[in-house]
Image (tube, grey):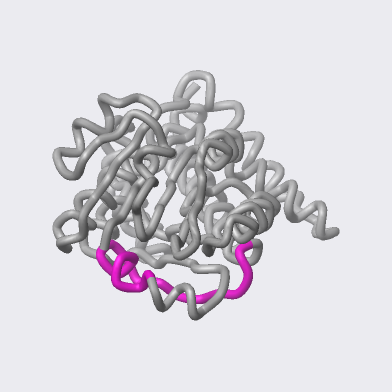
Amino acid sequence: MRVTLLGTGRMGTAIARRIAAAGHELRLWNRTRRRADEVGAGEVFESPADAADGADVVLSILFDATAVGQVYAALAPRPGQVLVDMSTAGPHLPEQLAQQVREAGADFLQAPIVGSIPAIDSASAMILVGGDEAVLERVTGVLEAFGQPRHVGTPAQAASLKLINNAMLGAVSAFTAEMLAAADREGLDAETTFGLLSRMVPYLSARRRGYIERSHDNPMFELRAMRKDLDLALDAGHEAGAALPLLASVRELFAMAEPAHADEEITGLIEEYAR
């Protein structure tokens, strides 16, 4: 299939390479062209509209609602195309995008990804797909190049589930930083402590380098992106009438760490406890 990917950050780059390896005709666009050129696969275009023109499937994975809105405003969807947004931008935007795309005669899916770059590289990332199941069937072959698509309801529901997932990740990450810092103050061995925590929460092993070696570069999940997602999760929960005092505290912790560690791995939060 002819596949366009809009957005070639770390996640987008990994997705692009998997799509190209699966044999699809790949077209790329990124706001900073150099990032798209560095993918080393596909044809790079100067604008999102040019990249999307003639594609069967248009994927997007962008930083926030502002970026997604700007890119979609530049597109001219055509009948038969399927536009799939994989960004984490809150539950309201997908419904707006879906209406915009349907009015042009095309189809829309919201499909945020649960999993980081290693999961994409092994095509084991979970893809939460919201929208028409028949439309999903048309693009399953593309999505399976880098993950495991699962239909979860409407576009808004898919977006909300991603926020629930990221909120849990943020909370667990913050508590891990707090417990490791406490163990250090108590004179406990860091490796032993981390081993116990990883036994309770196996996902932590993927971030051992950050927590134990205190190395937060080359992030799988940037701290500033986590703070952004926690804001979105709080907004969505409060709008629904949910009480989220713990999540609000976690958000404040990440906001405190953001000025010094914005572009680092979320494990950079632990440095706030070292002060």
**Is 132 situated left or right of 244 in this image?**
left
Q: Which quadrant of the figure contains the N terminus?
A: bottom left
**Is 232 situated left or right of 19 in this image?**
right
Residue at the extreme right: 241
Residue at 62% from the left image edge and 44% from the top image edge? 230
Q: Which residues are magenta?
A: 139-155
Quadrant of res 228? top right
Residue at 30% from the left image edge and 65% from the top image edge? 142
Name the one closer to the observer, 265 or 215. Answer: 265
Q: Position of residue 74 (x, y in %)?
A: 52, 36
Query: Image height check: is 109 above or below 39?
Result: below
Q: Position of residue 146 (x, y in %)?
A: 28, 62
Name the one closer to the observer, 115 or 257. Answer: 115
Residue at 30% from the left image edge and 30% from the top image edge? 217
Query: Image height check: is 187 above or below 109?
Result: above
**Is 91 situated left or right of 242 in this image?**
left
Taking the magenta stretch, the answer to whether it contains residue 233 is no
Q: Position of residue 62 (x, y in %)?
A: 46, 41
